[in-house]
Image (cartoon, rainbow, N blue to C red):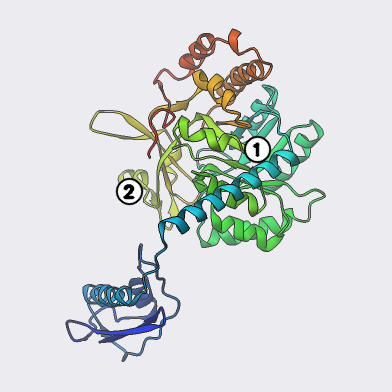
Amino acid sequence: MCLEVIGNEHSVTVYSTNPAQKALKRPLTWEYAFQQLGRLGTTPFWLDKLELEIDDGIMLPVSDLNEMRRLAIEELLQDKPKQTVDRQTYRQRVERWKHRQGEERADLQTIKSIIPQISVAVSDPETLQAAIQAGAKRVLIGGEHWRSRRGFSLEEIRSSFERCRKQGIDCVWRLPRILNQGQSERLLGELEKASGWAEKPNLMVANLGELEILKAVDSDWAFEVDYSLNVFNEASLAYFIRQGAKAVTLSPELHHEQLGPLAKWPGVELLVFGDLEMMVSEYCPVGATLGGKKGDHCAGTCVKEPHYLRDRMRYDFPVETDQECRMHLFNVKILNLFEELAQIRRMGISSVRLQLTRQTPGQVRQIVRLFSEAWDTLHDGKRATWMSDEGMNELTSLFPEGFTKGHFFRGVL
């Protein structure tokens, strides 16, 4: 088999090691060839178009396809012209970039002054009610739709916005972190309906695909950025603000020293309490091990009782499944930066978030009350008198398994 690859104004031709064979089970199709040849990883290329000319009923081992792809890319990379800049030019570019970032940050500072506040993320109407009862002034509703909870219908999202608006509560619709094709189409339909409401809801996007969907419905629709977009530096923060983001939640993997420069930007949010996702997978271990199918339908084994994955140290990591039967694996210990609130406030962080999407209404009420009292005290300039011991004792009684400070003191870079 001959593979001709055209790219970078060059073309290369490579041949398979073995001849093609008559297919016994699975002949080579355009879809399969595109899938294998399109796996270009960290190379600077992507597969834009594929023309496949083979006889029917022919197959080629996948190892041959992969080797042809590898050889072709190697040759293209050798032909790729190397662009270099001298050290002085590089330094000038860096200084121009820093100057531009500073100007953007200064512009935003003059546009708006954000009052420090607490955001409360909830996943169902019951915990939303609990958050409001505890005095929450900013709520984030939606996100992943757990199978263990009722979640929000589109009508409940609309009515929640109406209710919050009447009570002077800032309400934001959090979109799911992961979407498949069917979910993307449903979200597009829901956003088209929501765009016709009397007042469009504020949205928080969790991936770049959602931003494209949102822009397709209304290019001027106000939005915020969730932590799953992994904003880790001023370049990514400035990018989303240029795209129109009104607020950005920072990556929870940032070290406290890395937070300092980002805290100078208005509209940044930081996770300070809640469950941290460690893994998301299409594979459902609950259904695979305990029987998850009744014919073509899920048996709902995952919602009958809590499930965990136990590691070699005998720690039990909570497992949740969403409506698409994805597995979400959480840290055995909950993120808790209650004792660091004074330090976070000194940085100038505009908003801190309580990620309470798996907690009970009673836990939500208590957590929101504790953090709100502490944050208000720090905002009123009473940092010297604020003590975290009493609040920590209450939180420990709620979660005896203990807490983690995440990457606040041990960043990933």
At 55% from the left and 21% from the top, the residue drawn is 341
Between 80 and 197, the one nearer to me in the picture = 80
Residue 406 picture quarter? top left
Residue 319 picture quarter? top left
Q: Badge 2, how many Cα within 10 Å: few under 14, some, many 20+?
A: few
Q: What kind of element bears circle 1?
A: loop
* Residue type marked 1: Pro
Q: Nearer the viewer, mark 2 or mark 1?
A: 1
Q: Position of residue 83 (x, y in %)?
A: 40, 68
Q: Quadrant of the N terminus?
A: bottom left
Above/below status of 387 relative to 19:
above
At 53% from the left and 50% from the top, the residue drawn is 95
Between 160 and 263, the one nearer to me in the picture = 263
Q: Badge 1, how many Cα within 10 Å: few under 14, some, many 20+?
A: many
Q: What kind of element bears circle 2?
A: helix
> Residue at label 1?
266
Residue 329 is left or right of residue 150, and the answer is: left
Q: Which tag, 2 or 1, sits closer to the chain's start?
A: 1
At 69% from the left and 61% from the top, the residue drawn is 217
Residue 382 picture quarter? top right
> Residue at label 2?
288
Please say whether residue 153 is visible from this viewpoint: no
Q: Position of residue 115 (x, y in %)?
A: 71, 29
Q: Point out which mark residue 352 bears.
A: none
Q: Position of residue 371 (x, y in %)?
A: 59, 20
Above/below status of 313 relative to 104:
above
Please say whether residue 288 is visible from this viewpoint: yes
Above/below status of 243 relative to 274:
below
